[in-house]
Image: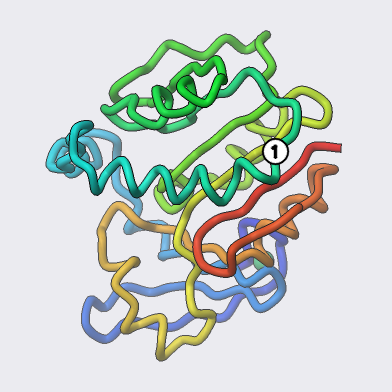
């Protein structure tokens, strides 16, 4: 098996609790579940419908505020934004609009058919989306494609511990819809492949990338 991001040979390990096989790339630090564990869209949708995302919930707002507090100081001269994979809620988009941005939303389940392939953005945000993607490399490329020159891509997904024993104890991969796992290094490799630059990361779950 080869890494879906950098094409290097990967090592496999099995989580004894679930018998799920994972592949770990030591080149770009990408980990992915064996593809037979990838779910079809309708099974994923059933799971997402259980998410309680109440827009009036102070905790949910604070959660997005932490994301904005990290990314916005790194972003200069951006006006147009796409929230890619927003889910049912458009809360992050409305918070961005309060900051003065003009924001579009897209979600394959809840807000489909909203993408205009000819439209380019100054900033694309995507929170808790990448861990669900069957083809993160291709999606990353397509998002960079949707950016203006000098535009920004800001992502949130939990970085894995990069240690097999710690990984097995980690909660994040136990969600059946979470199938692929990253670290800042993985995004750095994706940036090299796509002529962009990883400007900053918080060593935990957020990266800001700039298109050259
Ligand atoms: Zn790799």
Q: Is mark 1 within 8 Å of ligand 1?
A: no
Circle 1 Cα neighbour tier, 10 Å, few/some/many (<14 / 14–19 / ≥20)? some
Q: Residue at x 29, y 47 (%)?
A: 39
Q: Is residue 120 left or right of residue 91?
A: right
Nearest the viewer among 182 and 1 is 182
Q: Residue at x 66, y 44 (%)?
A: 73
Instruction: Specify the quadrant that holds the C terminus.
Output: top right
Q: Is residue 202 left or right of residue 161?
A: right
Give coordinates of residue 157: x percent, y percent: 47, 55
Q: How many marks?
A: 1
Give coordinates of residue 143: x percent, y percent: 63, 32
Tell which residue pokes out farthest to the bottom in this image: 165
Give coordinates of residue 92: x percent, y percent: 40, 31
Nearest the viewer among 55 and 198 is 55
List the residue tagged with mark 1: 75
Q: Is residue 99 left or right of residue 198?
A: left
**Secondary element type, mark 1:** loop
State which quadrant residue 173 falls in.
bottom left
Q: Residue at x 55, y 20 (%)?
A: 100
Whether 9 is drawn above or below 138: the answer is below
State which quadrant residue 210 falls in.
top right
């Amino acid at each position: 098996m080869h890494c879906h991001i950098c094409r290097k040979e990967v090592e496999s390990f099995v989580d004894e609790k679930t018998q799920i096989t994972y592949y770990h790339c030591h080149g770009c630090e990408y980990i992915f579940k064996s593809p037979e564990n990838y779910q079809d869209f309708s099974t994923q949708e059933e799971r997402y419908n259980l998410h309680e995302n109440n827009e009036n919930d102070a905790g949910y707002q604070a959660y997005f505020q932490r994301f904005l507090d990290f990314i916005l100081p790194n972003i200069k001269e951006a006006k147009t934004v796409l929230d890619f994979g927003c889910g049912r809620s458009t809360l992050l988009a409305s918070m961005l609009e309060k900051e003065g941005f003009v924001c579009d939303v897209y979600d394959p389940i809840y807000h489909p058919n909203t993408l205009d392939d000819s439209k380019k953005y100054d900033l694309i945000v995507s929170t808790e989306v990448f861990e669900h993607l069957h083809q993160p490399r291709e999606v990353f490329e397509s998002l960079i494609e949707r950016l203006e020159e000098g535009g920004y891509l800001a992502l949130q997904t939990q970085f894995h511990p990069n240690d097999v024993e710690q990984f097995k104890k980690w909660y994040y991969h136990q969600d059946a819809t979470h199938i692929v796992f990253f670290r800042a290094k993985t995004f750095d490799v994706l940036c090299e492949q796509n002529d962009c630059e990883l400007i900053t990361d918080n060593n935990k779950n957020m990266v800001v990338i700039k298109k050259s």
